[in-house]
Image (tube, rainbow, N blue to C red):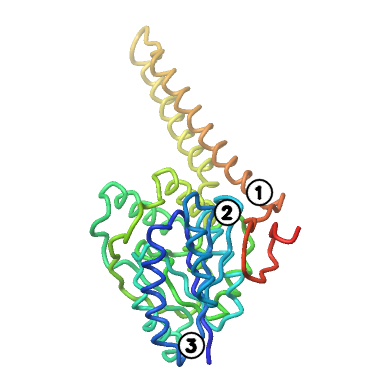
Amino acid sequence: MKTIGIIVPCYNEAAVLPMFYKEATAVMDALADRYKTEFIFVDDGSKDETLRRITELAVTDARVKYISFSRNFGKEAAMLAGMEYAVKHDYVCIIDADLQHSPEIIPQMLDYVENEGYDVAASRRADRQGEEKFKSFLSGSFYKVINRISETKISDSAQDFRVMKRDVVKAILSMPEHNRFSKGIFSWVGFNVKWISHENRERAAGETKWSLKGLLKYAIDGILGFTFAPLKLPFLFSGLLFVLSFIELLYGVIKNIAVEGYAPSLPLTLAAVFFTGCLLLLCVGILGEYLARTYTEAVNRPKYIIAKTNTNTTYFTLEGE
């Protein structure tokens, strides 16, 4: 009998967890003759009753495992922790707890990876209906930009919801970076992927945890993690400034000859100085972002710290100390 580990990242999901558990277990119970299931709930430092709800489920269901962080480390860390524990399974599934990802399509995903020769079965959003127009515009613009400047192509409709074979998970875990952008990592490792069109459901309870600030940070991590194109901007700016300065010099020389008493305008000079200063600061800021990520990798701090767990994970944990 094959085994599957279902990773469920959670942050303040106490209101929806009972509904998710009921729906997900109903789906997996129907497959009990083919798969042995383990649910891995990763509590990302929730401030509500999420951990208590999970531990209550663990008392009544031995299939429920939980990993609770000492603080909020982010969904990327939660998915990583889940994969590091679940890599022992034949198949690994990642699904959100808010029921926007439908557990009903997990059997279809399993069929693709087990019987159709695919390594990954992943969902992608059928459309952005119901999403805020401004957020949709920013998201679409981000993926257009990153796909133009990066060799790793990422679908703007791709979701984290997926079922993967063990070898795929091992490949993902072989990438040790701290500033993780999983959509980029999923694409970078390759493998044979079956995409399934999936219409997002309404969140069953609670509120979205993605703020504009969080999405901006996620976008920056994606761009800096999968392309060096921003580092080429200083060369482009320097070339542009050289051309502009040459044109300005040529214009000044010609006008000085043609117009008696001509002198460059002070506002034009100040504007040129400010423009040059802005470009220099932008370039320094880009270099600073890459340097900060180099420093983060160099200090090699834990990507997350486990405060409580009922698993036998050997990653950095406070339990038993």
Q: Label 3 sits on what residue type?
A: Tyr
Secondary structure beneath disc 2? loop
Choose between 173 and 236: the one closer to the eye: 173
Left or right of 135? Residue 118 is right
Q: Residue furthest right?
A: 321
* Residue linked to disc 3: 35
Choose between 72 and 318: the one closer to the eye: 318
* Residue linked to disc 1: 296
* Residue linked to disc 2: 179
* Mark found first going from the N terminus, 2 or 3: 3
> Residue 230 location in percent, x, y?
51, 47
Numbered tag placed on residue 36 in the rendering: none
Crowdedness near tag 2: few (<14), some (14–19) or many (≥20) residues, C-alpha within 10 Å: some
Select label 3 or label 1 by which is in front.
3
Residue 248 placement: quadrant: top left
Residue 121 visible to the viewer = yes
Residue 151 visible to the viewer = no
Left or right of 279? Residue 83 is right
Q: Verify CB contact (< 8 Å) between mark 3 and mark 1.
A: no
Q: Residue furthest left?
A: 129
Q: Verify CB contact (< 8 Å) between mark 2 and mark 3.
A: no
